[in-house]
Image (cartoon, rainbow, N blue to C red):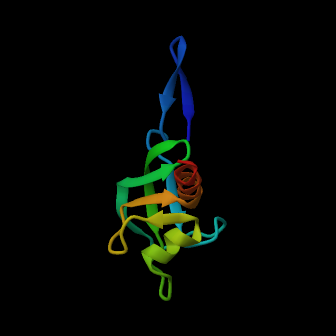
């Protein structure tokens, strides 16, 4: 994701972290989660078609909520590990890698 902010006489690149944007997963976007898990603040890495992004995300910890891995898969992110994930690749990026790998 690419954001820019006007500073003095030019646009300065900004990240979602600079803008204090947090991603809440595990709930519909219209609902807040009162028991979210803030343990991945600032160190969750997502590999996507357009680059590598470091994001602030909140996992849902409501009673009966799916595991962190299931929450990531539900939004189309494939976690690098099944135990305490902190890195994920988007399914779009994995499909692109697969297509490019088949071209060789």
Q: Position of residue 74 (x, y in %)?
A: 58, 72
Residue ranking furthest to the right? 30
Q: Could one spot residue 99 in this view of the protein?
A: yes
Q: Position of residue 63 (x, y in %)?
A: 47, 87
Q: Nearer the viewer, residue 102 or 53?
A: 102
Q: Could one spot residue 33 in this view of the protein?
A: no
Q: Nearer the viewer, residue 30 or 49?
A: 49
Which quadrant would residue 92 be assigned to in this image?
bottom right
Q: Residue at x 33, y 71 (%)?
A: 84
Residue ranking furthest to the top? 9
Q: Residue at x 64, y 70 (%)?
A: 28
Tell me if residue 44 comes above or below residue 10 in the rendering: below
Q: Position of residue 10 (x, y in %)?
A: 54, 15
All told, the count of numbered labels is 0
Q: Residue at x 53, y 71 (%)?
A: 73
* Apparent side of residue 29 relative to residue 98 in the rendered image (left or right): right
Q: Residue at x 40, y 53 (%)?
A: 45
* Apparent side of residue 98 relative to residue 59 in the rendered image (left or right): right
Q: Position of residue 21 (x, y in %)?
A: 51, 49
Residue ranking furthest to the front? 104
Check the picture and name the quadrant holding the N terminus. top right
């Amino acid at each position: 994701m690419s954001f820019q902010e006007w500073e003095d006489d030019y646009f300065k690149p900004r990240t979602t972290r600079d803008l204090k944007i947090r991603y809440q997963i595990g709930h519909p976007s219209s609902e807040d989660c009162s028991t979210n898990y803030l343990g991945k603040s600032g160190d969750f890495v997502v590999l996507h078609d357009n680059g590598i992004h470091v994001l602030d995300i909140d996992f849902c910890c409501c009673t009966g909520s799916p595991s962190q891995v299931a929450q990531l898969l539900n939004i189309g992110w494939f976690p690098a590990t099944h135990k305490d994930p902190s890195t994920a690749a988007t399914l779009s990026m994995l499909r692109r890698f697969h297509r490019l790998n088949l071209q060789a």
